[in-house]
Image (cartoon, rainbow, N blue to C red):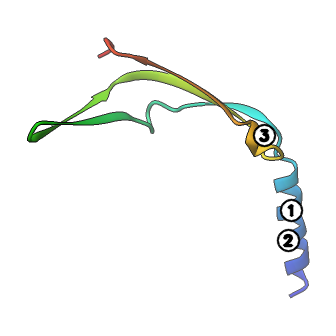
Amino acid sequence: MKHVPVLVLAVLLSVSSVSAAVYAIDPVHSSVLFSVRHLVGRVTGRFNKFDGTFDYDPAHPESLKTSATIDQHGK
């Protein structure tokens, strides 16, 4: 079990090396869906064309910033 402390140290070093970055929303693995209840039914839909980013710093999670744009006419 001598390898466990080395493994823990490697994990801690890799986590501490994570820095602030701006990430783009991946449209292939994401979706923008909506659902509206009206009278006795429910209408659901999706937006097919969108993009966005988020700015995340693990050392300061309270400073998270997001931005998104939905093209309501995109197909």
Residue flagged by tag 3: what amino acid is it? Answer: Asp
Which residue is label 1 attached to? 12
- 37 lies above or below 51: below
Judge left or right: residue 35 versus residue 40.
Answer: right
Determine the residue positioned at 11% across, 36% down.
39
Which residue is label 2 attached to? 8
Disc 2 and disc 1 in contact, CB within 8 angstroms: yes
* Classed neighbour count for the residue bearing mark 3: other residues with Cα under 10 Å, few (<14), some (14–19), many (≥20): some
Q: Residue furthest toward the top?
A: 73
Q: Nearer the viewer, mark 2 or mark 3?
A: 3
Provide the secondary structure element on which disc 1 rests: helix
Count of labels shown? 3
Residue flagged by tag 1: what amino acid is it? Answer: Leu
N-term-proximal mark, 1 vs 3: 1
Task: Locate residue 29, reporting x and y percent.
Answer: 45, 39
- 10 lies above or below 6: above
Measured in 3D between alpha carbons, the distance from the residue under mark 1 to the one under mark 3, in whole angstroms, is 17 Å
Disc 1 and disc 3 in contact, CB within 8 angstroms: no
Q: Residue furthest toward the front?
A: 39
Between 73 and 60, the residue placed more toward the observer is 60
Provide the secondary structure element on which disc 3 rests: loop
Which residue is label 3 attached to? 57
N-term-proximal mark, 2 vs 3: 2
Task: Locate residue 31, reporting x and y percent.
Answer: 39, 35
